[in-house]
């Protein structure tokens, strides 16, 4: 799950580069005055008319003075026909030639004259550095295609993984249902029964041979894949395989149960449960299915707090389904509550009103989802006797989801401050992208904490110190700093300098954390000091000695029998 969060961040970076580059190359980088691009037709001509009027160049005499001041310019370069028009009225942009109206030296001189007018409060500025029909623009344009290729190369697999992974797995199960019932179920059951015996004996070589043969099975439900992956890790470490004996028995019973349900369906012509096909497909491909949870429960020595964390780490995968189900009810409730708040407090400012509207919807959505998800878990008969160990992880996970949706609400305020459909809004491109970056990066901090808890307790019994620091403490510190600085920038003391400082703190914190996270694992895993190398060697030797004693003890027991 943490890998998915990192992929989302990487996708954001590539997308920002692409969209930012495209918007920049097509708007901001083009010569423009007040976001009106050079040579852009009617708008550009109107801008030139305004400049001519402000510069006081409406008459022929004033134009002569202008050319006397800027000797590098001549009427032949600027006007139609190569000369000043006859003094029969006000001279406007219609008298300029195409080359003259887009001549950069002439535009700069015209701006300099206009800015001399004491009535000009905001000086005219020619922005950009190239023309829309320039060779440089032609050379830079193809890079957009390279970048968009990178975006879609990451977007398609990530979307499949995030949104359609379970659906694709369910579809695959439905497609192979007949062959599974005919023979694939029996082959997998025979495989797991034989593996269970070898695991109970701790037969290292036999288990390794079975793992090598595992790829030949056609029917491999996700909970079996999980067990085989964990067995592989133990095989590599030459650890104790007998800990999987009971879990393998549970996996075998689970597959037999799935087979019996499918066999009855084949005989009767229809399933005996509501949404039968969807349930079987979900049990086959989902990490959070009841069979996956049963496998992980079998690995636990006792029903302690770690089991509660492990169960919730698996059950939380269903949270997304409840989010989809609660979307429409959340809209209805937020519309009612939002209207009530708006009626009671009518003097809210723009940003506060935006925050109130966004928070009303998102908080209503997540609370409804939490209620539905928690009822599903705490009313489950499987957890009837262990509800007490589920309370703490439930509070932690649900609190993190509430923080996530509050962060999204705050991020929407920054995004909404830029009216992206307004004329000239392209000049605020980086303001808007920085708001989007805050929204995604700050939200991803909380998701990363959730992912750390899920990955850790799903695979291990406890959090390691490294994961505790890198996966929980540092992201939460970064989130607190980014959130406080963002709120101070939006609602704190007025003053451009203070807002800039808070925005800088926000950006440096978010970008700095994700850069650190991207390189920390590489450095930690590859920079090994001599002392650490000695400790690792000692640990390996101790494990080898322990395994040798265990094997010797097993042989002695068998000989005695």
Image (spheres, helix red, strand yellow):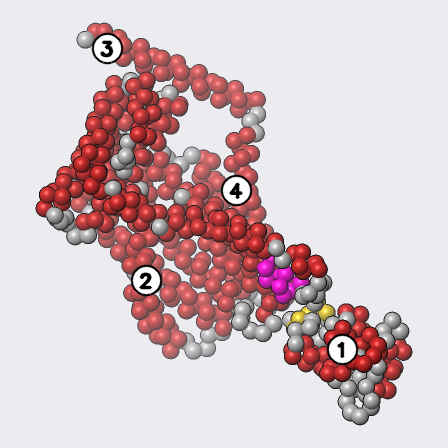
**Segment tinted magenta in the rendering:** 21-29
Q: Give the distance between the C-alpha atoms of the residues marked 2 and 3, in whole angstroms.
A: 61 Å
Q: Give the distance between the C-alpha atoms of the residues marked 3 and 4, in whole angstroms.
A: 49 Å
Classify the position of the N terminus by image quarter: top left
Q: Along the horizontal axis of the image, is 30 left or right of 459? A: right
Task: Please say if 271 is above or below 204.
Answer: below
Of badges 2 and 3, the one in the foreground is 2
Classify the position of the C terminus by image quarter: top left
The image quarter in which residue 489 lies: bottom right
Residue 22 part of the magenta segment = yes
Task: Please say if 492 is above or below 146.
Answer: below
Task: Pinpoint residue 260: horizontal percent, then vertical percent.
Answer: 14, 39
- Furthest residue to the left? 268
Q: Give the distance between the C-alpha atoms of the residues marked 4 and 1, in whole angstroms.
A: 57 Å
- First in sequence: mark 2 or mark 3? 2
Task: Please say if 516 is above or below 509.
Answer: above
Q: Residue at x 32, y 51 (%)?
A: 319
């Amino acid at each position: 799950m943490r890998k998915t969060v990192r992929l989302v961040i990487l996708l954001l970076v590539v997308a920002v580069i692409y969209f930012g580059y495209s918007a920049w190359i097509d708007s901001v980088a083009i010569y423009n005055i007040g976001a009106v691009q050079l040579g852009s037709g009617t708008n550009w001509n109107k801008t030139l008319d305004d400049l001519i009027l402000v510069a006081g160049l409406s008459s022929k005499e004033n134009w002569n003075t202008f050319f006397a001041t800027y000797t590098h310019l001549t009427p032949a370069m600027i006007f139609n026909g190569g000369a000043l028009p006859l003094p029969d009225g006000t001279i406007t942009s219609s008298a300029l030639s195409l080359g003259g109206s887009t001549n950069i030296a002439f535009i700069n001189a015209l701006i300099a004259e206009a800015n001399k007018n004491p009535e000009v409060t905001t000086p005219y500025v020619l922005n950009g550095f190239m023309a829309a029909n320039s060779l440089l623009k032609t050379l830079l344009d193809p890079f957009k295609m390279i970048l968009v290729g990178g975006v879609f190369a990451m977007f398609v697999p990530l979307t499949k993984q995030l949104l359609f992974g379970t659906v694709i797995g369910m579809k695959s199960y439905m497609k192979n249902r007949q062959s599974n019932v005919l023979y694939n179920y029996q082959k997998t059951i025979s495989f797991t029964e034989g593996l269970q015996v070898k695991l109970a004996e701790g037969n290292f070589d036999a288990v390794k041979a079975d793992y090598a043969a595992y790829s030949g099975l056609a029917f491999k439900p996700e909970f079996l894949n999980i067990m085989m992956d964990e067995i592989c890790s133990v095989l590599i470490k030459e650890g104790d395989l007998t800990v999987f004996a009971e879990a393998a028995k549970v996996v075998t019973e689970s597959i037999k149960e799935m087979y019996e349900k499918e066999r009855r369906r084949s005989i009767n012509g229809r399933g005996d449960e509501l949404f039968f096909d969807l349930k079987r497909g979900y049990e086959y491909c989902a990490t959070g299915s009841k069979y996956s949870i049963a496998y992980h429960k079998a690995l636990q020595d006792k029903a302690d707090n770690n089991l509660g964390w492990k169960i919730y780490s698996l059950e939380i995968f269903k949270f997304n389904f409840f989010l989809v189900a609660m979307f429409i009810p959340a809209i209805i409730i937020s519309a009612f509550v939002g209207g009530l708040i708006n009626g009671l407090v009518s003097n809210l400012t723009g940003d506060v009103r935006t925050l109130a509207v966004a928070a009303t919807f998102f908080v209503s959505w997540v609370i409804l989802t939490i209620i539905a998800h928690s009822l599903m878990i705490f009313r489950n008969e499987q957890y009837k006797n262990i509800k007490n160990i589920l309370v703490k992880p439930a509070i932690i996970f649900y609190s993190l989801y509430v923080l996530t949706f509050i962060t999204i609400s705050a991020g929407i305020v920054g995004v909404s401050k830029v009216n992206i459909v307004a004329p000239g809004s392209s000049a605020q491109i980086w303001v808007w992208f920085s708001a989007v970056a805050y929204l995604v990066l700050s939200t991803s901090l909380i998701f990363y904490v959730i992912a750390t808890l899920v990955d850790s307790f799903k695979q291990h019994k406890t959090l390691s110190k490294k994961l505790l620091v890198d996966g929980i403490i540092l992201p939460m510190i970064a989130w607190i700093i980014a959130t406080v600085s963002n709120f101070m920038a939006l609602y704190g003391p007025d003053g451009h300098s203070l807002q800039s400082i808070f925005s800088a703190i926000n950006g440096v914190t978010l970008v700095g954390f994700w850069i650190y996270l991207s390189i920390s694992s590489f450095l930690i895993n590859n920079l090994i000091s001599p002392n650490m190398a000695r400790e690792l060697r000692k640990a390996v030797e101790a494990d080898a000695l322990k395994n040798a004693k265990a094997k010797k003890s097993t042989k002695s027991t068998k000989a005695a029998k």
